[in-house]
Amino acid sequence: MRKPSFLKRIIYFGVIRPVAESITAVAVAVYIFGEKKHWFKEITGKAARVTPNGQISNLKEKYSNFTHADFYIGENKQNHKKMAEKTNNLQDNLKNVMPGLFNNNEWISKILLRMGDAVIATDEKGIVLSMNKVAEDLTGWKIAESEGRQVDHIFNAINDITNLPIKNPLYKALKENKEILLANHTVLINKDKTQRIIVDSAVPIHDNDANVIGGALIFRDVTEQALDKKKLVENEGLLTSIMENTSLIIYIKDTEGKYLMINRQKEKVFNIKASRLIGKKSSLHLDEEQAAESMRTDQQSIMENRLVEFDQEIQHADGTSHSYHTSKFPLYDSEKKVYAVCAISADISESKKNVEMKEKIAIQEAILKSEIRFDELTKNMPNIFFSLDRSLRYTSFNKACETFTGKKAEEVIGKTMQEVFSSGELLFIEEYKDVLKTGKAKTFTSAFTVDENTFTFFVNVFPAENGISVLMTDLTSKKKSEAEMLELVDNLQKKNKDLRQFAYTVSHDLRAPIARVLGLVTLS
């Protein structure tokens, strides 16, 4: 019988026989799994192989001696014989099919063309014999221009990292008579200089006597997967970098409250290692009340299926207390079911202080404006107004004070009353001290003499934030007016009395003459 062509032998040894081996192995495995599962562990070593004449070989030595008539494995000969019959039927079918395959070049071509991976077949010297459409597209070389060339000329690969050429693995596979896998980061350069990332392997092809008669390069384009993986790795690296270097506390718990992940900031704040906390609950590093509250907010986010936000106080490992704003939200698996809750806590202590400081400044500004308006009011009011601190030092001194005392405010502010006035000029010291002591306002009216002039004042002494304030209303003019009024009234009363006396005298002196006149009138 005429021997199959070299290309047919490549197809047989590179494609058909491995398929047959797989089918035979599956048949044996199905039987063993179906009827005697514990036997499966005994069948190890190389898989069964089908030779061109349909015989099974390369089973473990213990099970290699069987024929169509007698297939014996183990103790139960009847069951084993059934398996032998099934296997032998498969062998017969393969034996009947294979000669047809070798005589059908069109069928062989279709196998190569329809393979999803790129395939380049060579002889034992690496001369290209055939290649499929996928290989043509990836290399940029057509089969018509590739046949007879060294595979190196067609398959041009470099390392993605070093950009250095990669030795073609087919030569090593041919030399060492074994499958060779290409290293990662392999880039195939197309004839038009475009580049694609590939995964590649090279296998030797044997004849019936196990002699190497050629080889095959099998590779496929994984550019998109590699880029996606690279992007995923970059994103994971970016996310990890952010999580490990952020000042935010970030952690993830499962639905039972056990930690799945904590970041470096949480380790730092609580002085606890992730290795110790992963798989444990919050009670490991929080007190009972804090752990219960943490669990409550976890469950709230999970049960209500929403974002939960709140402010909390967290005590750091160094003993300092910080204000945090915490956000908790559920995480979902591929089936849209909640499997965990993620928490992110931001330290808002400084911003909270800033807010409080702004509020304080706003209050101080309002007070200052009020004080300015108050100072303007008191400065220009006609009443005497001044303020004293608790040491009786002047803190304010209005224009009325300047006019009355003849002293300027800049000469008085910051000095005590004793430093400004002589002992004879000091007024109401005891009343001032009493208000400072009791914190209760006091009012009184007092008259005093200055340079032989007598003055009367209505005095209001009331407590202030840092001492007392004194408001003195000059009643001197009023008192003088009242005195003059009283004097006038007194004079009027005296004159009225004199008038009454005069009337009486006149009346007495005129009574007798009038009577005589009246008598004469009567007589007549």
Image (spheres, helix red, strand yellow):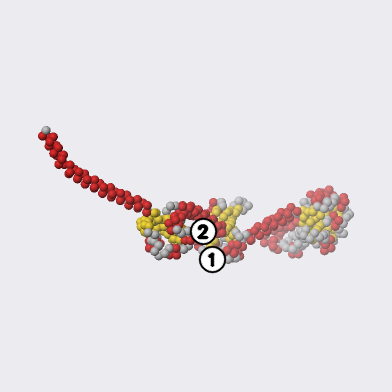
- Name the mark on residue 319: 1
Per the image, the residue denoted by label 2 is 293
Q: Which one is nearer the viewer's eye here, 224 or 211?
A: 224
x, y percentage for residue 268? Answer: 59, 64
Relative depth, front residue between 252 and 124: 252
Is residue 443 visible to us here?
no
Mark 2 and mark 1 lie on one chain; the one further toward the N terminus is 2
Identified at 61% across, 62% down, the residue is: 264
> Which residue is at 72% across, 57% downward?
28
Q: Is residue 41 visible?
A: yes
Residue 76 lies left or right of residue 278; in this view the side is: right
Residue 471 in the image: state x and y as whole percent: 41, 56
Question: Residue 157 shows which numbered tag?
Answer: none
Image quadrant containing the C terminus: top left
Q: Nearer the viewer, residue 418 or 27?
A: 418
Which quadrant of the structure image shows residue 222?
bottom right
Q: Is residue 86 left or right of residue 454?
A: right
Q: Secondary structure at mark 1?
A: loop
Number of residue marks = 2
Is the residue marked by circle 1 packed among few (<14), some (14-19), or many (20+) residues within 10 Å?
A: few
